[in-house]
């Protein structure tokens, strides 16, 4: 006979860790999708490597594979060219004979490649879930509402939108339609200089940190010249007076990886490694950029390390896949390259592009099946291309 008893409730308080596991609390220093409890899985098995080689060989000149710097080594191995997002989009446009452009990056990058390539070329993203949290922080509806706020404040006609390359095609199109330009982390200062020749204010989308760092660090503005527009608050959380007084209206967006570096990271690495050079990306917070020795784009970071003397020591504040690749590359030249922080990790969305997805993509294309095509509609493409062309025309 089975006897069932009713247990008395226990007076047990769940620990903070338990609440996190239950999804009832959140780590304020964490952001959904960017947790990194350990290393990446071990490299893919040799069968996948062989299959990728076979499919790529079968496709021949019909396929052109682009590999962003933040991709895993196992993916970079099959890339025909590597670079940042804009360089890769231009590389694709310069390869008109390639029917398929396989972009190993994230969604906005594939959109840019589709905008810049011919109608005969088909841009493919191996995993459609490979997005960008920064790009997703500014939607077309939110930006249109922001423009209405600026219009009601009487400043829209003197405001020029400048959008970072790390934005959706919709945001690039908005920028083109309203007389603005696109920028990269390499030419942001030139883009802002051009914008201030056209108007009195800049609406900078979607990365607040690149906008603030460029305006204050590179162009001599003050932090008081910048205001932060929060799309989740009425009127962006700003008064009409604040909007009218500002020179830089910064969108409340950021990179989930670069935004986690802190001044404590800088201080810690300086204490651990005497004579270390701290080199960070301008998507980092303003106080981190101010504490660093060198600041620049991904291409700048690579070139700086190439020119560095043997025996020099470097702590790099950017995505971990790239830092590890650079550490391995320059170890033979007696250059010590370390990651700036102990806890910041890989770009989780960029790492969705792995060898299994690449193999599936290449084998599908080799069999004549077009998968995961990224295609921007004609109207959006037209205005986005206009904004990109204004950037290309910058002095």
Image (cartoon, helix red, strand yellow):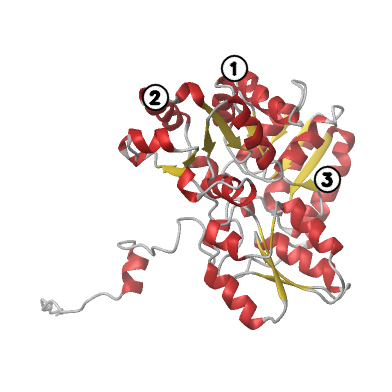
Which secondary structure lies at badge 3? strand
Numbered mark located on residue 148 in the image: 2
Measure the alpha-carbon separation of dots 3 and 2.
Answer: 42 Å
Numbered mark located on residue 379 in the image: 1
Numbered mark located on residue 45 in the image: none
Mark 3, residue position: 81
Which secondary structure lies at badge 2? helix
Above or below — where is 277 with respect to 181?
A: below
Image coords of residue 364 (percent x, y): 73, 38
Chain-order first, disc 3 or disc 1: 3
> Looking at the rendering, which quadrant does residue 18 occupy?
bottom left
Q: Within 10 angstroms of label 1, few (less than 14), some, or many (20 or more) residues?
A: few
Q: Within 10 angstroms of label 2, few (less than 14), some, or many (20 or more) residues?
A: some
Compare residues 81 and 236 and report the one nearer the observer: 236
Measure the alpha-carbon separation of dots 1 and 2.
Answer: 21 Å
Give yes or no for contact between labels 1 and 2 (Cβ–Cβ under 8 Å). no
Compare residues 324 and 337 and report the one nearer the observer: 337
Q: Specify whether residue 253 is in view.
A: yes
Measure the alpha-carbon separation of dots 3 and 1.
Answer: 29 Å
What residue is at 79 percent from the left and 57 percent from the top? 302
Chain-order first, disc 3 or disc 2: 3
Q: Quadrant of the image for the C terminus?
A: top right
Above or below — where is 61 with respect to 3?
A: above
């Amino acid at each position: 006979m089975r006897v069932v008893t009713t247990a008395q409730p226990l007076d047990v308080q769940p620990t903070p860790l338990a609440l996190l596991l239950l999804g009832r609390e959140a780590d304020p220093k964490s952001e959904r999708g960017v947790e990194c409890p350990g290393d990446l899985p071990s490299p893919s098995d040799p069968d996948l490597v062989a299959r990728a080689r076979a499919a790529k060989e079968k496709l021949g000149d019909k396929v052109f594979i682009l590999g962003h710097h933040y991709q895993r080594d196992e993916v970079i191995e099959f890339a025909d060219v590597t670079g940042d997002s804009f360089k890769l989009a231009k590389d694709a446009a310069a390869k008109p004979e390639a029917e398929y452009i396989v972009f190993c990056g994230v969604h906005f990058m594939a959109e840019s490649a589709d905008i810049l390539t011919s109608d005969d070329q088909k841009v493919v993203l191996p995993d459609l879930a490979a997005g960008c949290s920064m790009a997703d922080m500014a939607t077309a509806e939110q930006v249109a509402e922001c423009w209405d706020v600026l219009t009601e404040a009487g400043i829209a006609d003197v405001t020029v939108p400048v959008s970072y390359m790390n934005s959706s095609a919709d945001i690039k199109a908005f920028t083109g339609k309203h007389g603005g330009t696109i920028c990269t982390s390499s030419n942001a200062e030139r883009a802002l200089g051009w914008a201030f020749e056209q108007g009195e204010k800049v609406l900078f989308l979607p990365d607040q940190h690149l906008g603030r760092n460029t305006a204050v660090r590179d162009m001599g503005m003050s932090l008081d010249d910048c205001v932060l527009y929060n799309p989740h608050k009425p009127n962006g959380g700003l008064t009409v007076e604040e909007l009218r007084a500002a020179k830089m209206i910064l969108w409340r967006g950021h990179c989930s990886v670069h935004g986690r570096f802190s001044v404590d990271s800088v201080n810690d690495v300086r204490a651990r490694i005497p004579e270390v050079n701290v080199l960070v990306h301008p998507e980092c917070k303003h106080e981190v950029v101010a504490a660093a020795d060198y600041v620049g784009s991904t291409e700048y970071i690579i070139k700086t390390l190439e020119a560095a003397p043997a025996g020099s020591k470097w702590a790099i504040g950017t995505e971990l896949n790239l830092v590890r690749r650079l550490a391995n590359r320059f170890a033979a030249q007696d250059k010590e390259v370390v990651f700036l922080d102990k806890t910041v990790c890989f770009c989780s969305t960029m790492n969705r592009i792995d060898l299994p997805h690449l193999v599936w993509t290449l084998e599908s294309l080799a069999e004549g099946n077009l998968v995961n095509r990224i295609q921007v509609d004609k109207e959006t493409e037209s205005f986005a291309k206009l904004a990109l062309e204004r950037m290309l025309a910058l002095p």
